Amino acid sequence: MNKKKFYNSLKGTSETRNGKLKKTVSKDRWNLAHVSEEEFWEEYTTDSLKARSTERYRKKAEALLELWSTYLDLNKNTNILQIGCGPEDIINHFKTVKKYSIDPLANFYKKRFKFDYEASNLKNARGEQIPYPDKFFDIVILTNVLDHTESPERVLSEIKRVLKDDGIFYFENYIFQKNFLRIAAIWGLLKKTFTKQIFNIHHPFMFTRDDVKILLGSNFTILEEDCGKEIGAHKNIESLVKSFKTEKKFNIKLLSKFGLYGSINYMCVCKKDNAI
């Protein structure tokens, strides 16, 4: 593939208001996404979740600990927080560290699933208001959560607040090409008009790479980044593109023929601006 052409396709911002990136959504839109997220997880049991992702999360947790060890001395006193952890995620599989997690559906998860939530100190809370004191965590994790939030800026500001000055912020989110988002906007309008349904209902936001870098840049400096790599799924962008070409869904294969790839994983390791 032509990498230069691909990376150029990731430039530009998504939805704008008065020429600026849209950085909040209405409470009603967030509540709608919140309800739909709960309905999504209702389709799973503890056993089906374990079969779906437990081994992948275990391997990813090991890989991330190795990555982070290049920046920090990880030990039994290392405090790690995962925001928007879902019913199970990498936070459930770390060893020899102190684990913490928050999710606005935490109470629902505790009632429905049988994971060890005491070990991960799971609390019912949102990223916009993290229930921990300033500079408490050595590592904060936000993986594919920012596009679920009501106020991405507020979430990132809170992460900066609770992160130690020498701590690291690990970020992942699916991003989209600008032209993909243009097509999605048209498709979303048609879907709402004819079916009364919302396109991509779980996600109040759909970001480009520039969007997330603009948002991150207000509070953090990126130390390293990758686009296309997804631990446990894709080794690099070439692997991602290959997966689109073998996808069974017709609409995804059709878009990929024109070089329009959705759900491209963007990952980075960051430090607080005042810590550089």
Image (cartoon, grey):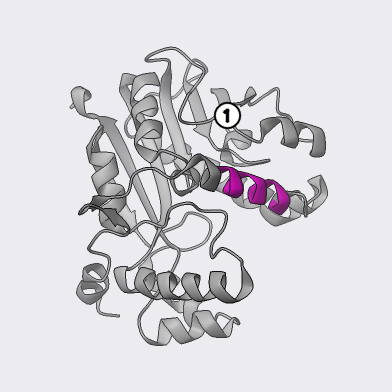
Residue 69 in sight here:
no
Tell which residue pokes out farthest to the top in this image.
133
Q: Which type of secondary structure does the marked residue at label 1 adopt?
A: strand
Give the residue drawn at x 43%, y 20%: 137
Q: Residue 35's x, y, as percent?
A: 66, 46
Q: Nearer the viewer, residue 34 or 258?
A: 34
Characterize the magenta stretch by its predominant secondary structure: helix
Give the residue drawn at x 38%, y 23%: 73
Left or right relative to 255: residue 3: left
Give the residue drawn at x 58%, y 49%: 33
Quarter holding the C terminus is: top left
Decide whether residue 35 is among the magenta residues. Answer: yes
Q: Nearer the viewer, residue 147 or 256?
A: 147
Q: Residue 80's x, y, as percent?
A: 49, 26
| Number of numbered discs visible in the structure rendering | 1
The amino acid at mark 1 is Ile
Give the residue drawn at x 63%, y 73%: 195
- Residue extent of the magenta highlight: 31-40
Q: Residue 169's x, y, as percent?
A: 36, 33
Q: Which residue is mark 1?
A: 102
Vertical relation: 236 (above or below) 156: below
User: Residue 255 appears in which quarter of the rendering?
Assistant: bottom left
User: Residue 182 appears in which quarter of the rendering?
Assistant: bottom left
Decide whether residue 269 is among the magenta residues. Answer: no
Residue 186 in sight here:
yes
Vertical relation: 60 (above or below) 227: above
Quarter holding the N terminus is: bottom left
